[in-house]
Amino acid sequence: MVVYEPLYIFFFFILVGLIYIPVFFYVIYNYKFNWIGLLFVLLSLFSYLFIGKYMMDAGSFADEHHSTLFGIGFLELTLLTYPYIFIGLSVLLGKKGLRNKS
């Protein structure tokens, strides 16, 4: 079975993965969080790290033979959206306020 995975999908999701880093630091720098917000921030960070480890690990992947580039398939790339979901929930549900920038 051949799965059509265009190369631009690979580059789009790698870009999405790399943009997460400045977004994460922006959220940490600009907002104060209650314990629920901190929990979602930690979930976001750990999910980003675990997905990165999963993508770069030398194990066998379910879609290894139908990968886009460098053995990273569409499944691994779509998992990169979960850290954004958790960081968004931390701001929506756990924000105490803005940090003072004085």
Image (cartoon, rainbow, N blue to C red):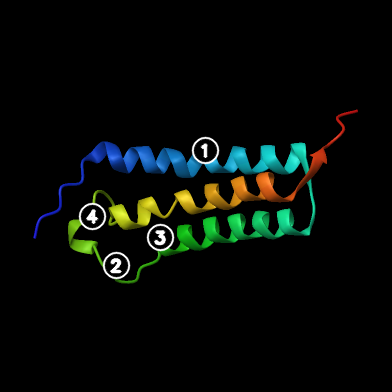
Which three-letter amino acid code belongs to the residue tagged 4?
Ser
State which quarter of the image contains the C terminus: top right
Badge number at residue 67: 4
User: Left or right of 20: which side holds 11?
Assistant: left
Q: Nearer the viewer, mark 3 or mark 4?
A: 4
Above or below: residue 6 compared with residue 43? above
Q: Secondary structure at mark 3?
A: helix
Compare marks 4 and 2 and give the one earlier in the sequence.
2
Question: Spatial distance from mark 4 to mark 2, Cα to Cα?
Answer: 9 Å
Residue found at the far left of this picture: 1
Q: Nearer the viewer, mark 1 or mark 3?
A: 1
Above or below: residue 65 compared with residue 82? below
Which three-letter amino acid code belongs to the residue tagged 3?
Met
Residue found at the far top of this picture: 102
Question: Spatial distance from mark 3 to mark 2, Cα to Cα?
Answer: 11 Å
Residue at 31% x, 43% y: name it: 10
Question: Spatial distance from mark 1 to mark 2, Cα to Cα?
Answer: 25 Å
Where is mark 2, residue-wise?
61
Q: Identify the image quadrant of residue 29.
A: top right
Which three-letter amino acid code belongs to the residue tagged 2?
Phe
Where is mark 3, residue-wise?
56
Residue 22 picture location, percent across and down: 61, 38
Compare marks 1 and 2 and give the one earlier in the sequence.
1
Question: Spatial distance from mark 1 to mark 4, Cα to Cα?
Answer: 22 Å
Badge number at residue 65: none
Q: Secondary structure at mark 2?
A: loop
User: Left or right of 76: which side holds 43?
Assistant: right
Where is mark 1, residue-wise?
19
- The foreground one among 71 and 39 is 39
Residue 36 picture location, percent across and down: 73, 58
Q: Secondary structure at mark 1?
A: helix
Residue found at the far front of this picture: 93
